[in-house]
């Protein structure tokens, strides 16, 4: 379905990533946001607060992130496409509700504009140290999808993708920005509404008697109904059966939790998005995401100028992790070089997927700034020898 | 016998396939649900537009037993979830049905802000003075000197006076009844359902298995008799005078019934004033 | 709905005309459900129905007065 033109600010803009993310949400059809101020994410909802009364929707600043992260879910069940925006400390507070969204299969988007941590850390400076938390932060077994934009343009485009994936899989999607991508100002082209594909809510067409809130037709994603439509359904965070009723037995647990996981894993190939360059003859592949990929780009160019055979793999979806791609490459390359603004998070996934078939070398950075291209280049050269 | 089940006004509101419920003999939560059902019928609320949100705890299980669009959410967060529902679909009549621990301890912050904002929610707080589901721990409402599992030598903290708290925060309708006062409770619920803004009804209820048992206060029936004997109806009493104690008087009644613009009216007014023609009314959210 | 009853005693106690008493019978859960002792005294006020926390009883002025 095409985007609703009321939310699409068609034109060429010179805006930062935070602002572009807000426009992406509006273009995707988001008409509800609940937020709480936290640097460096606040501008996303500030813009939403200013835009949405002229588009037709609601923003509410809640009293804390615990509230924001569940208020948006109430709005989803009331019929809206909804999201919230935060950074590290707020992301930590939202974890219980991310789990609730995963368990109740509430389609929604959580934007984390990552900053230095742990704890209060570096509120105004970048890091990429919430990547594992995005995947494992809530308790229990569940799967999420996480996207990593590396430019304001991608903050626009991929936010739409995030909402689309959320609706398709009825899952909370983590939008993992970082402070630099959020605060860098670049050209952002917003196309006409009819050029934007938007995935509609998987609303059931069954009547109230036939409808099973968590029944699936073999594709593992149930159809949804909203409050007020006469379905009289029940939603609970307790382990539940197809009727949505609590059913706290190992058998139901096994069935439910495996389905929550498999609905994403089975589609991992379809979900995976990455950008690749020069992989065919590469000795070394640089695996990066977010702002670090911009620096890595330069380092790769510098290495190639010197004659090193270096390929680029930029992760656009960080989760589910593209195991298959790494495994394929691992058989053909000497090493993966993984620069990140953390002390080693996604590199562990690369290493796991490589399964010893290629070396995996991290280029760590504690956060607070970005790598210098030379730092990454140095490791590329070492790895190539 | 099947005749009776058809006649009983509460029956159409129950997910009968899940009855009998998990609440203990003598627990008052089921009693409040009877009053709720009758209030729904009397107030002529459009049943299709009803949504019920609860938190975690014994009272939180109400959501699972009522045949309405019902949401069993996380501990303490029924009110913000309900806020999201209401804002996304203003046509919904959103009720919050939860317990004293859920609403005033972990959920306390959300309680006061929703009251402050006067969000159009009807909150039924079943107050059994304890955290029942988890085995009888102290709640912010547990009266002094009571024995609980986390205060085995007696509670020494002052307890919350919930009507006072929510009145101060801004609620437009505040009442307290006990599970003995079934008719008055149903009537209060009905009044709240017909009123716009943040309504809060506290229902004092027995927890015979934990609170009453540990404090050697008898069973549910003994507690109901205590409510009958020691309650005093004082409509309009100042909420500051409504403190509860272990064996003392229980003041019940309707204490606050005032008019304040609700959150959504205020929001709309502000936008119309500031934006004039640029303001776009929120369209029907239902996206399909 | 005899099977729902948990013999809490509310209906027996609060019936204004003392129509009910706990029986010596058992339901399948081992509780003594109430039975109608004075059907002629039932006014159909349905306080029993309102009090019952287990949704096990409802009073109406139908045929025999109280119904369980």
Image (cartoon, rainbow, N blue to C red):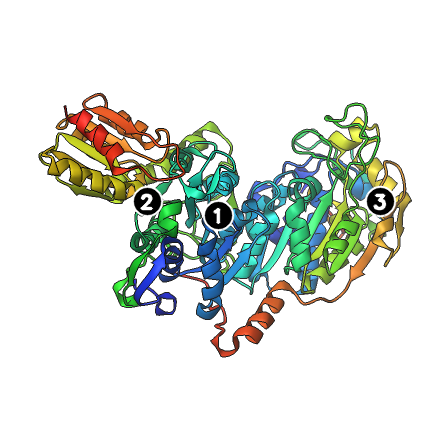
Image mark 2: chain:
A
Mark 3 highlights which residue? B243
Check the image and report above or below for A20 versus C26: below
Residue B130 numbered mark, or none: none
Where is residue B52 drawn, in percent x and y?
Answer: 59, 52
Check the image and report above or below for A83 versus B21: below
Q: Classify residue A266 as left or right of residue B85.
A: left
Task: Give the distance between the C-alpha atoms of the residues marked 1 and 2, in whole angstroms.
Answer: 18 Å
Residue C36 visible at all: no
**Do the dots labelled 1 and 2 sit on one chain?**
yes
Element carrying mark 3: loop
Image mark 1: chain:
A
**Do the dots labelled 3 and 1 sit on one chain?**
no
Q: How many marks?
A: 3
Mark 1 highlights which residue? A39
The residue carrying pointer 3 sits among few (fewer than 14), some (14 to 19) or many (20 or more) residues within 10 Å by Cα, namely: some
Task: Give the distance between the C-alpha atoms of the residues marked 3 and 2, in whole angstroms.
Answer: 53 Å
Image mark 3: chain:
B
Where is residue B42 drawn, in percent x and y?
Answer: 70, 63
Residue A74 visible at all: yes
Q: Nearer the viewer, mark 3 or mark 1?
A: 1
In the rendered structure, are the residues bearing label 3 and label 1 in contact, judged by CB atoms less than 8 Å apart? no
Nearer the observer, B68 or A83:
A83
Q: Nearer the viewer, mark 1 or mark 2?
A: 1
Mark 2 highlights which residue? A148
């Amino acid at each position: 379905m095409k985007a609703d033109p009321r939310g699409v600010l068609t034109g060429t803009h010179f805006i930062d990533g935070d602002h572009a993310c807000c426009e992406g949400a509006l273009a995707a059809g988001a008409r509800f946001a609940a937020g709480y101020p936290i640097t460096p994410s606040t501008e996303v909802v500030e813009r939403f607060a200013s835009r949405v009364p002229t588009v037709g929707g609601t923003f509410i600043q809640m009293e804390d992130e615990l509230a924001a992260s569940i208020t948006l879910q109430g709005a989803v069940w009331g019929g809206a496409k909804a999201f919230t925006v935060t950074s590290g400390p707020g992301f930590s507070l939202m974890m219980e509700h991310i789990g609730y969204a995963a368990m109740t299969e509430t389609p929604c988007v959580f934007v984390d504009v990552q900053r230095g941590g742990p704890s209060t850390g570096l509120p105004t400076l970048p890091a990429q140290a919430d990547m594992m938390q995005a995947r494992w932060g809530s308790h229990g077994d569940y799967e999420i999808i996480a996207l990593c934009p590396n430019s304001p343009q991608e903050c626009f485009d991929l936010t739409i993708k995030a909402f689309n994936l959320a609706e398709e899989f009825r899952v909370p999607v983590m939008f993992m920005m970082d402070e630099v991508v959020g605060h860098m100002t670049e050209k952002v082209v917003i196309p006409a509404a009819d050029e934007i594909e938007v995935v509609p809510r998987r609303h059931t067409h069954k009547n109230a008697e036939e409808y099973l809130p968590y029944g699936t037709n073999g594709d593992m994603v149930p159809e949804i109904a909203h409050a007020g439509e006469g379905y009289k359904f029940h939603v609970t965070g307790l382990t539940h059966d197809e009727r949505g009723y609590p059913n706290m037995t190992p058998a139901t647990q096994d069935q439910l939790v495996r389905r929550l996981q498999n609905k994403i894993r089975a589609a991992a190939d379809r979900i995976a998005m990455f950008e690749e360059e020069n992989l065919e003859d590469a000795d070394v592949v640089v695996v990066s995401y977010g702002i670090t990929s911009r620096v890595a780009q330069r380092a790769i160019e510098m290495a190639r100028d010197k004659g090193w055979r270096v390929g680029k793999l930029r992760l656009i979806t960080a989760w589910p992790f593209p195991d298959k791609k790494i495994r394929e490459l691992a058989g053909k390359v000497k090493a993966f070089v993984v620069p990140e603004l953390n002390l080693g998070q996604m590199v562990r996934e690369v290493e796991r997927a490589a399964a010893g078939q290629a070396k995996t070398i991290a280029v760590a950075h504690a956060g607070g700034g970005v790598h210098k291209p030379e730092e990454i280049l140095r490791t590329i050269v070492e790895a190539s020898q | 016998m099947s005749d009776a089940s058809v006649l009983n006004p509460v029956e159409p509101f129950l997910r009968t396939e899940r009855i009998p419920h998990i609440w203990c003999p003598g627990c008052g939560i089921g009693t409040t649900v009877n009053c709720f059902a009758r209030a729904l019928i009397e107030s002529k609320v459009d049943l299709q537009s009803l949504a019920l949100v609860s938190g975690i705890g014994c009272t939180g299980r109400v959501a699972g037993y009522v045949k309405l669009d019902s949401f069993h959410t996380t501990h303490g967060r029924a009110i913000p979830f309900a806020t999201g529902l209401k804002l996304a679909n203003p046509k919904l009549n959103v009720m919050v049905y939860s317990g004293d621990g859920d609403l005033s301890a972990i959920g306390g912050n959300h309680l006061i802000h929703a009251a402050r904002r006067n969000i159009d929610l009807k909150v039924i707080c079943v107050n059994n003075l304890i955290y029942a589901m988890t085995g009888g721990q102290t709640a912010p409402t547990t009266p002094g000197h009571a024995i609980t599992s986390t205060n085995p030598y007696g509670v020494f903290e002052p307890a919350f006076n919930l009507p006072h708290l929510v009145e101060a925060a801004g609620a437009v309708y505040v009442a307290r009844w006990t599970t003995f006062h079934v008719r008055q409770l149903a009537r209060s619920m009905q009044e709240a359902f017909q009123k716009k803004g943040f309504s809060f009804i506290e229902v004092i209820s027995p927890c015979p298995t934990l609170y009453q048992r540990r404090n050697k206060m008898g069973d549910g029936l003994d507690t109901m008799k205590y409510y009958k004997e020691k309650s005093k109806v004082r409509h309009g009493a100042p909420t500051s005078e409504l403190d509860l104690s272990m064996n003392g008087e229980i003041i019940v009644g309707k204490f606050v019934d005032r008019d304040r613009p609700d959150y959504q009216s205020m929001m709309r007014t502000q936008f119309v004033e500031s934006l004039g023609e640029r303001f776009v009314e929120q369209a029907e959210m239902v996206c399909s | 709905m005899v099977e729902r009853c948990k013999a809490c005693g509310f209906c027996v106690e609060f019936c204004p005309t003392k129509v009910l008493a706990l029986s010596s019978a058992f339901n399948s859960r081992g509780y003594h459900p109430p039975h109608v002792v004075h059907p002629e005294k039932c006014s159909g006020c349905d306080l029993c129905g309102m009090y019952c926390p287990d949704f096990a009883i409802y009073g109406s002025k139908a045929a025999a007065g109280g119904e369980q």
